[in-house]
Image: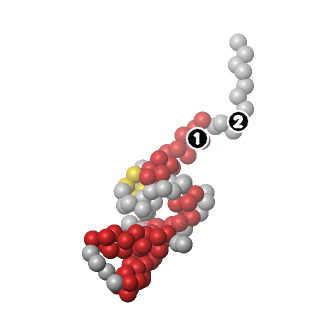
Amino acid sequence: MEDYIKQAIEIVKAQASVRNMTEEEINSMIMNVIKGIKSAVSEEQLTNDEQDPAVDPKKSIRERSIVCLECGKQFKVITKKHLAKHELTPEEYKKKWGFKKNTSLVCKALARDRRKNMQKMELWKKRTAKVK
């Protein structure tokens, strides 16, 4: 038996223990409770699956901040720890909201500063030992 049928039977059992009910009343009540549970579960799944973003995903990555599309809060970086609160990984978040896989969840200014710092470090050049 499915979970919601078991739940409906338990609910009706509790109701029948409180007041006298005919067999027809019990059967009709079970059917009504099953329908109610099914509709509640399907509505919950729809709201979870078709959640509206806090802002337009294309406009969420801004110059000085990035907006979390799940909760609407603004950050400089959306971290794994924050996404874990929404039960998502960065990959799932990007897929859900239509970002490319290589998109960083960082505001534009911070990404630009990081890029400049990496260019200054010139890590791609071999380090040579200084001879004295």
**The N terminus sits in image quarter:** bottom right
Q: Is residue 6 found left or right of 130 in the rendered image?
A: left
Q: Residue flagged by tag 1: what amino acid is it?
A: Met
Comparing 115 with 4, the one in front is 4
Coloring basis for residues: secondary structure
Residue 41 image offset from top left, x and y in percent: 44, 73
Using the image, determine if residue 109 lies above or below residue 26. above
Displayed quadrant of residue 52: bottom left
Q: Which mark is residue 118?
A: 1
Displayed quadrant of residue 23: bottom left
- How busy is the neighbourhood of tag 1: few (under 14 within 10 Å), some, or many (20 plus)? few
**Residue 84: in sight, yes or no?**
yes
**The C terminus sits in image quarter:** top right
Q: Which residue is mark 2?
A: 125
Residue 121 image offset from top left, x and y in percent: 60, 35
Query: What residue is at 36 percent from the left and 74 percent from the top?
Result: 12
Comparing 54 with 132, the one in front is 54
Query: What residue is at 58 percent from the left and 57 percent from the top?
Result: 91
Using the image, determine if residue 28 lies above or below residue 6. below
Q: Residue flagged by tag 2: what amino acid is it?
A: Lys
Q: Which mark is residue 90?
A: none
Residue 2 image offset from top left, x and y in percent: 52, 72
Query: What residue is at 52 percent from the left and 44 percent from the top?
Result: 114
Q: Which of the marked residues, 2 or 1, is nearer the chain's N terminus? A: 1
Query: What residue is at 58 percent from the left and 38 percent from the top?
Result: 120
User: For the residue labelled by badge 2, is the local secondary structure a helix, a strand or a loop?
Assistant: loop
Comparing 128 with 67, the one in front is 67
**Residue 47: in sight, yes or no?**
no
